[in-house]
Image (cartoon, helix red, strand yellow):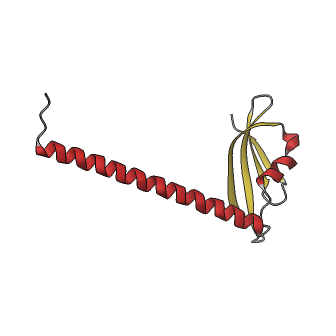
Amino acid sequence: MIKYTITHLLVLSLLLFTGLFFTDTTFADNNEAQYEQHYTVKELKASGKIDSLENILMKLSGYNIKRLLEIELKQDISTSGRQFFIYEIEYLNHTGIVLEIMVDALTAEVLSIEKEY
């Protein structure tokens, strides 16, 4: 039989409590951040600052996208001071090469393509 002192039990309880507390908090923070990001994308689309990802991907059909790996939406500022958004799309093509394509999120203009690995 294992004997626990009161100190052991208090430490164990404290570790268990803090672990559950911080895990729940982190989970809540992540959900809130995802909600805010989703809401922001909806606002950008509704205001005409970006096109839907679905439309962008349809316009990129000639780039042989087999599987999407990662998509990021980033804000940039042009040399003239105009704010615009860029989709960074990492994908696997039909020949097994991983590429990252940078696309204007409103016009679907391809800004650059890079071979990742």
How far across and how far down the image is residue 111, in percent?
Answer: 80, 52
Q: Residue at x 36, y 49 (%)?
A: 20
The foreground one among 79 and 106 is: 106
Count the numbered circles shown.
0
Identity of the residue drawn at 71% across and 63% down: 42
- Nearer to me, 44 or 94: 44
Q: Horizontal placement of 10 versus 65: left or right? A: left
Q: Is residue 96 above or below residue 63?
A: above
What residue is at 83 percent from the left and 54 percent from the top?
A: 108
Q: Can you see residue 78?
A: no
- Answer left or right for 101 relative to 24: right
Identify the image quadrant of the C terminus: top right
Residue 27 rendering spot, x and y as whole percentages: 47, 52
| Viewer can see residue 58 | yes
Q: In the displayed structure, would residue 20 be above or below residue 77?
A: above
Residue at image coords 66%, 64%: 40
> Where residue 83 appears, x then y in whole percent?
74, 68
In the rendered image, the residue lying farthest to the front is 1
Up the image or down, 9 lies above or below 41; here it is above
- Residue closest to the eye, 33 or 106: 33
Observer-nearest residue: 35 or 88? 35
The part of the image, by quadrant, that contains residue 1 is: top left
